[in-house]
Amino acid sequence: MDAGNNPNSADDSSLEGSTTVVEPTAGSPVVPGAPAAAPGQPAGDTATPPTSQPKRRFSLRYLFRRFNIYLLAFILLLVVAGVVGTIFYLKSQNGTIGSNVPSQALTQDELNQLANSDVSVGEPQHTLNVQSNAVFAGSVLMRGNLQIAGTLQVGNNLAINGVRVTGNSTFDDVQITHSLSLTGNASIQGQLNVQSNLGVNGTGTFQGALSAPSITVSALQLNGNLNLTHHITAGGGTPARSNGSALGGGGTATVSGSDTAGSVNINTGSSPGVGCFVTITFASAFNSTPHIVITPVGAAAAGIDYYITRTTTTFSICTTSAAPGGTSFGFDYLAFD
């Protein structure tokens, strides 16, 4: 048998741990000095004293076998305590909004007081926990910050004095009754309808078609073709005019239109001469000498040998031959920078 599993092995069978008694057999000679036989026993026989229990010798192996069960129980207790402490620590780290603030639950009496009067519940550092759904028939005023951990659903109109959105947002329908100010880039995937004025201080880039009943710009630069499906109306102030010597005595000239396009009507008087009929002064000077296109109106104007002179501020309609006296004719003009 294994000496480690049998407490009576090895150490218990050793001669050092017990008293050995040698019993003589019958007929053996009596050893001098040996104790006398007890009455009723044969001579030569001695009484057999009771056998004493073997004495256990102290050893580290015996001590370890005795106390290892307590050591295992202590180690198990330490492991359980560590697991429980870890669970509580992780739970405290994963708390929701307001988990670090002491909370206070409402009793039914307190709920009844809230329904019938204006009362204060709890302290400022407490948290009101409502486990069921809550319906407020009246107004709700938040004097502090409002934090929403879930989804916010608004069934009716939402009126907010100011909205600041730091992330991406998706809006189905947005109506702005006052003004919209964008400091960054704005991307519009669908159609943009502007019921009133649209003012753009910087550069505007449109990848698709731009449709508007009226567009007013200070300057328009086209990098591609200009397709016009309707009339061109040249607006602006009416230029001034001054009569020339080619009108003759009592002759007159009038101008209508703008700097870009217009008409000149000429009525010659007596004894017209050569020179200029009229000089047109632009309402706004051109940046450079403009291109002037003159078209005679009527047969009388077609028979006149006319020419023009031009600067950035004026242009004149002149003739190299005297026009007939007492005659009316006209010219249309276009001016481009």
Image (cartoon, rainbow, N blue to C red):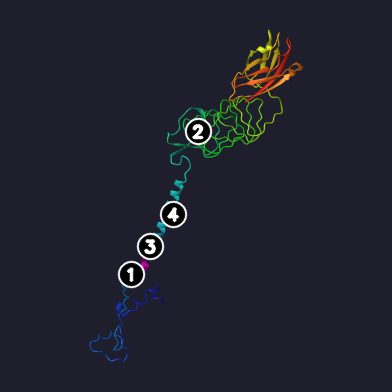
Q: Which residue is mark 3?
A: 71
Q: Nearer the viewer, mark 1 or mark 4?
A: 4
The answer to the question of whether label 1 and label 4 lie on touching residues, with beta carbons closer than 8 A, is no
Residue 167 as seen in the image, left or right of residue 300: left
In the rendered image, the vertical position of residue 269 relative to residue 151, given as above or below: above
Using the numbered discs, state the Cα–Cα distance from disc 4 to disc 3 in whole angstroms. Answer: 19 Å
Asked where in the image residue 122 lies, by quadrant, the reply is top left
Please state the horizontal and vertical placement of residue 32, each as a whole percent of the image: 23, 89
For disc 1, the neighbor class at 10 Å (few under 14, some 14 to 19, many from 20) is few
| Residue ID at (45%, 51%) | 87
Using the numbered discs, state the Cα–Cα distance from disc 1 to disc 3 in whole angstroms. Answer: 15 Å
**Which of the pair 111/304 is nearer the observer?**
304
Q: Which residue is mark 1?
A: 60
Q: For the view shown, which residue lies furthest in the left direction? A: 33
Q: Amino acid at mark 2?
A: Leu
Q: Secondary structure at mark 1?
A: helix
Please state the horizontal and vertical placement of residue 238, each as a whole percent of the image: 63, 17
**Which of the pair 294/76 is nearer the observer?**
294
For disc 4, the neighbor class at 10 Å (few under 14, some 14 to 19, many from 20) is few
Q: Amino acid at mark 3?
A: Leu
Q: Nearer the viewer, mark 3 or mark 2?
A: 3
Using the numbered discs, state the Cα–Cα distance from disc 2 to disc 1 in whole angstroms. Answer: 70 Å
